[in-house]
Image (cartoon, rainbow, N blue to C red):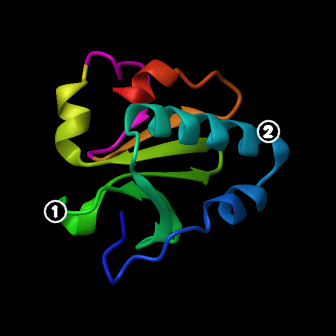
Amino acid sequence: MKPTASIELGGVEQYIAKHPKEVQEKLNKIRVAIQEAAPGSLETVSYFQIPGCFYEGYDYNGMFVWFSFKKPYVRLHVRPPTIENHKSELEGFTKTKSIVNFPVNKKIPAKIVKN
């Protein structure tokens, strides 16, 4: 599968590597959970200079999920309907319309990321 002309593959390892070890572990956990939930998706660092995944042919240039670190949280960025559709599962986590925040000092529930 080739990315659209405006998306360049890669950069995810470099993004993760520039953060502290504890944060790298959390970012990698989110990355693996996304890969398991969306096999065949492609990774890039684009738009907001954070890692994200896309499927060729989806709207929004194929992008459907991103992840990042903003102290003190590892963050999962999704389209707003996703958060609304999983409101009960995300109870107890700080969130915005499109971001779920996971405190770095706590376990990231992979099941939530995969949903």
- Describe residue 19's horizontal placement relative to residue 113 as left or right: right
- The answer to whether residue 15 is above or below residue 69 is below
- The answer to whether residue 114 is above or below residue 31 is above
Q: Which mark lies nearer to you, 1 or 2?
A: 1
Pointer 2 residue: 22
Q: Is residue 89 magenta?
A: yes
- The answer to whether residue 38 is above or below residue 4 is above
**Residue name at image x 18 percent, y 32 percent:** 84
Q: Position of residue 40 (x, y in %)?
A: 39, 47
The alpha-carbon separation of the residues under discs 1 and 2 comes to 34 Å
**Residue name at image x 71 percent, y 28 percent:** 105
- Determine the residue located farthest toward the right in the rendered image: 21
> Which of pointers 1 and 2 lies earlier in the amino acid sequence?
2
On the image, which quarter does residue 28 sit in? top right
Residue type for callout 2: Glu
- Determine the residue located farthest toward the front in the rendered image: 1
Element at label 1: loop
Instruction: Write down the region rendered in magenta.
Output: 88-97
Q: Position of residue 48 (x, y in %)?
A: 45, 70
Element at label 2: helix
On the image, which quarter does residue 82 sit in? top left
The C terminus sits in image quarter = top left
The N terminus sits in image quarter = bottom left
Q: Position of residue 49 (x, y in %)?
A: 52, 71
Q: Nearer the viewer, residue 77 or 35?
A: 35
Secondary structure mostly taken by the magenta-highlighted segment of the chain: loop
Residue type for callout 1: Asp
The label shown at residue 47 is none
**Residue name at image x 33 percent, y 17 percent:** 89
Q: Is residue 114 magenta?
A: no
The label shown at residue 59 is 1
Q: Residues within 10 Å of mark 1 (few under 14, many from 20)?
A: few
